[in-house]
Amino acid sequence: MIRVKPKQVDAERKLKAQAVSKDGYPFTPAYDHWRLNKDVQITLALPGAIDAETEAGLRATLLRYAEEASARHTENMVTRFKRYLRDTGASQVTATDLINWRARLGTEEQWHMGGLKGFLLAWHDYGFEGVSKEVVDLLQGWRIQGNEKGVAVANGCPESGPYTDLEMAALLDWANLAVARKDILFEHYAYLLTLAMTARRAVQIAALRGRDLDREADKRSLMFRLNIPRAKQRGLAFRGAFRSLAIIEDLYLVLLQQHRQSVAAVSEAIGREVDPVLEREVPIFLNRKRLEDVENSDELKDLLLGRTPDQLHATTAELGSALRCCARASTARSERTGEFIHLSATRFRHTRGTKLRREGFSAFVIAELLDHSDTQNVRVYTENTAQEAVVINELVGAQLAPFAQACLGKLVHSAREAIRGDDPRSRVPNDRQHAVGTCGNYGFCASGYRACYTCYHFQPWVSGPHEEVLVDLYAEKERAREAGCAEVIVNANDQLILAVEHCVSMCKEAVDRMAGATLLESDAHE
């Protein structure tokens, strides 16, 4: 007589019933597709001919994970178990196959087994069939090396590591210009700016709602804060905990405007104004595809306050697509490579951690500002003390200028070729009252002449005394250094210096081309 474990019988009964994920999404465990939240749908079509008892145990264990853990963690366990089956050709979990798989993974990829180890031990602890005591004893005796963290940070990789201060400045300058010219959507700009200024994960930014924007006023000043939902916390429900982050007014106003656009879209969908109470609950970044199915206020209320409150929030895939749209439109270049700057949400987090460490903050402060629960994942910032910032001086600046391409204006030979060239008020004088170019902007501008070099309205003259501007900028930088100012103050004008260096370089090339053309013309006449 075969004795069936009570837990196994209970698991089989649950697999036939309807289940609800940790995030409140209903799914049928017996099916191959489980929708666990707005971002994650796992597929249980397993490679090879898996043993029926093993598959039943796997599904039962995954069901527990789906109900009790995060959707992304459950998805990771499915991915790693599938790789185990695919790499080994196994139909069940055996000690021999695990030993062979570990050898095949090698040192660099052993972390895949590290993640699966905890899943297999939990599988056995739950009492489901498929993981034997022999397998458990083997796994408990293994010390598996985790994945190497922070390689891109430690190496200062220009493709995947932290951005330099100049690269961040170039990105933000481009983004501000692009949204003004409507080269990118305002929503995409808002997401990019939030990434750059908060260094939060995409899943956290997607979870933001209007009520998370906070404006505090007292007699002396205004404070702007963003209450950001926490992520990657075990046992935490959607928007179950928050950390408050001080932000600048610019980001506050951008997110406020983005929220107003989201509220307007919701109002249009339901055919009436949103109730003031619900208005604060509307996501800042909307899932517009899901919004198409919302027809009235009752449906809206259920989506925002019901069992699955994440449905109207943009998916991380949508936010990833927004960042890719920005990357395609971006013309910001790296002064290190001369190539367009690679955009990645992770790089903004690396940049924040690196900058905090350079400025002398402790591991605890860095962990708090990057929303870590402990300091184990911030050690890469605190242990690596190399200075990533490029030191700009008279020798280096001219070499980096062609890479940075920071001068955005259009070079003209004289005022006669310039837009507004016949208007004396369009002349741009430097500190010595020598004209360096023409302003092509018909609107009002309160910026000084220095800002012109990074403005696309500026038309620098080929014969303009741009070297005078360089001399003044380098002298100012040296005075700040001799006065003992912090590096961030000393290097404050580095982007401008590269823009002027780039302008000088373009002027020299233009003069050389004119000289070459004159020489050719002279030879032709002879």
Image (cartoon, rainbow, N blue to C red):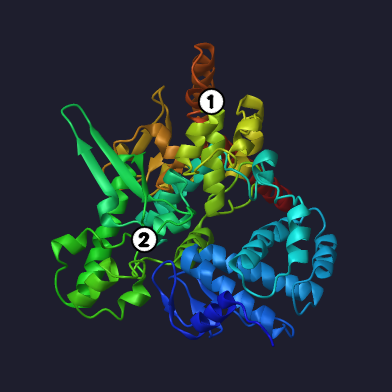
Find residue 331 and report its horizontal and vertical position in percent: 53, 54
**Residue 290 seen in the figure:** yes
Question: Residue at horizontal 63%, vertical 75%?
Answer: 58
Residue type, mark 2 in image:
Glu
Location of residue 180 with respect to 393 vertically, above or below: below
Find residue 457 and report its horizontal and vertical position in percent: 39, 47
Which is more toward the observer, 110 or 366? 110
Find residue 235 and report its horizontal and vertical position in percent: 45, 57
Residue type, mark 1 in image:
Gly
Q: Where the N terminus falls, by quadrant? A: bottom right
Question: Residue at horizontal 40%, vertical 23%?
Answer: 431
* Residue at numbered disc 1: 360
Which is more toward the observer, 312 or 182? 312
**Residue 497 seen in the figure:** no
Exactly how many numbered labels are in the figure?
2
Residue occupying the far bottom of the picture:
1
Location of residue 86 with respect to 162 vertically, above or below: below
Mark 2 Cα-neighbour bin, 10 Å: few <14, some 14–19, many ≥20: many
Mark 1 Cα-neighbour bin, 10 Å: few <14, some 14–19, many ≥20: few
Which is more toward the observer, 200 or 410? 200
- Disc ID at residue 187: 2
